[in-house]
Amino acid sequence: MATLEGFLDFLRATIRWKVEGLSDEQASARMLGSATTVTGMVRHLADTERYWFRQILGAVPVDEVGYAWEDGSGPSHAWEMDGGASLAGALEDYEAATRLSRAQLLGRDVEEELRGRPEVVTVRWVLTHMVEETARHAGQLDVLAELLDGRTGE
């Protein structure tokens, strides 16, 4: 479990690293002809953490999970860039969500079965899924950051 947690924490740090230095204007820019923005991606990642670690792993009732932007009951608000969209605020929310995720993992067995979805998944499955989900979005953020400020990285 430590290996999966380590990879996930590395990717979480990569998310922050990829977007550091972008202005709110840059982070709210739609570069791909869709609603996708840097700020929206970070918001989406925060609520993805909430879903998998609080709602599914922690069995927290959906109305108590603390979703900020999306809860599966309607359209996502993560991608809506109003005048108050702040990358710093989205990153703070993401950090708060990841802290709660880490707390949900304490004392868990990787083979523990979780039954909050139609199919049964294990803690290992959730961690593996979050590694791939976070890695995919880190790659997307890498491309967006390069389009916005020309920066490239590993």
Image (cartoon, rainbow, N blue to C red):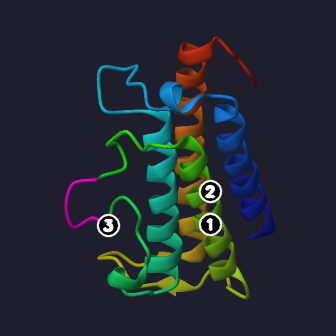
List x then y, in percent, for residue 30: 37, 24
Say which residue appears at 34% left-offset and 80% top-offset: 62
Q: Are marks 3 and 1 in contact (CB under 8 Å)?
A: no
SS under mark 1: helix
For disc 3, the marked residue is 71
Q: Which residues are magenta?
A: 72-76
- Circle number at residue 58: none
Judge left or right: residue 136 versus residue 104.
left
- Quadrant in the picture for residue 29: top left
- Relative to 137, say whether 63 is above or below: below
Q: Is residue 143 magenta?
A: no
Using the numbered discs, state the Cα–Cα distance from disc 1 to disc 2 in whole angstroms.
Answer: 6 Å
Is 28 in front, or is 14?
A: 28
For disc 2, the marked residue is 92
Is 70 in front, or is 107?
A: 70
SS under mark 2: helix
List x then y, in percent, for residue 27: 51, 31
List x then y, in percent, for residue 97: 58, 66
Crowd band around label 3 with a 10 angstrom C-alpha radius: few (<14), some (14–19), many (20+): some
Crowd band around label 1 with a 10 angstrom C-alpha radius: few (<14), some (14–19), many (20+): some
Nearer-N-terminus badge (3/2): 3
Say which residue appears at 80% left-offset and 68% top-offset: 2
Name which residue type carries label 2.
Glu
For disc 1, the marked residue is 96
Say which residue appears at 40% left-offset and 79% top-offset: 120
SS under mark 3: loop
Q: Are marks 1 and 2 in contact (CB under 8 Å)?
A: yes
Give the foreground label among 3 and 2: 2
